[in-house]
Image (tube, coloured by chain):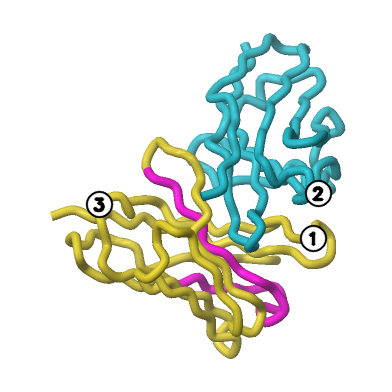
Amino acid sequence: EVQLVESGGGLVQPGGSLRLSCAASGFTFSSYWMHWVRQAPGKGLVWVSRINSDGSSTSYADSVKGRFTISRDNAKNTLYLQMNSLRAEDTAVYYCAREDIVVVPAAFDYWGQGTLVTVSS
Amino acid sequence: SYELTQPPSVSVSPGQTARITCSGDALPKKYAYWYQQKSGQAPVLVIYEDSKRPSGIPERFSGSSSGTMATLTISGAQVEDEADYYCYSTDSSGKGVFGGGTKLTVL
């Protein structure tokens, strides 16, 4: 069974840092591109970042570029999001999502349950 | 930056057809994907590559795309279809983008 489990969320002060993790299981993690998507309370989904299967290529939304870094450890089946210089507007539930390559190409076929990041003093 | 535009809300009675639109300049060249999100839950894929339906998604869900507009159609909407729906696509550089979301009310 495919599972994605996020962790690392919490309360952080403006300007602070946080690292989110997404533990993957039930599939060959190293074969899939992975994404982070966030959702502010009561608001819509926002794409944040993606990383290719071997970690050699990344992409970021303009709103987080230069502050956030996506990475992965295929040996540990884990996706990361390092978030620096956090702002109040980064407050959101952060989801990791798998981009499928076979059954539903380029779609997000599995999502984690999300982890809440709150940026406040 | 690239944007996808959706109506904030759509309302239908049970059994009626609900249509949710998504407009974006790159849609003639990029696929649209549709996600359903019920309150407190993670999103679920309901349409991929403009018009394909994943396994397990009811046949009443369909998608189409023409020019700069993609459309999600729910034929014979049911109360359990009440949710937020988001279109998703990518821009010319491959960055992802979601539409603002459409709240579907079925009552």
Return the residue nearer the eye: A66 or B84: A66
Question: What residue is drawn where x is 86% and y is 33%?
Answer: B59
Q: Disc number at residue A88?
A: 3
| Subunit of label 1 | A
Up the image or down, A73 lies above or below B14; here it is below
Quadrant of res B69: top right
Residue B62 drawn at (x, y percent): 83, 33
Q: What's the residue at 75%, 31% (across, down)?
A: B71
Rendering colour (chain B): cyan
Distance (Cα) linking label 3 and label 1 = 35 Å
Residue labelled with disc 1: A105
Q: The disc labelled 1 sits on which kind of residue?
A: Pro
- Residue B49 shows which numbered tag? 2
User: Which x, y percent locates residue A15?
Assistant: 20, 65
Please tell me whether residue A28 belongs to the stretch shown in magenta. yes
Chain in yellow in the render: A
Residue range in magenta is A21-40
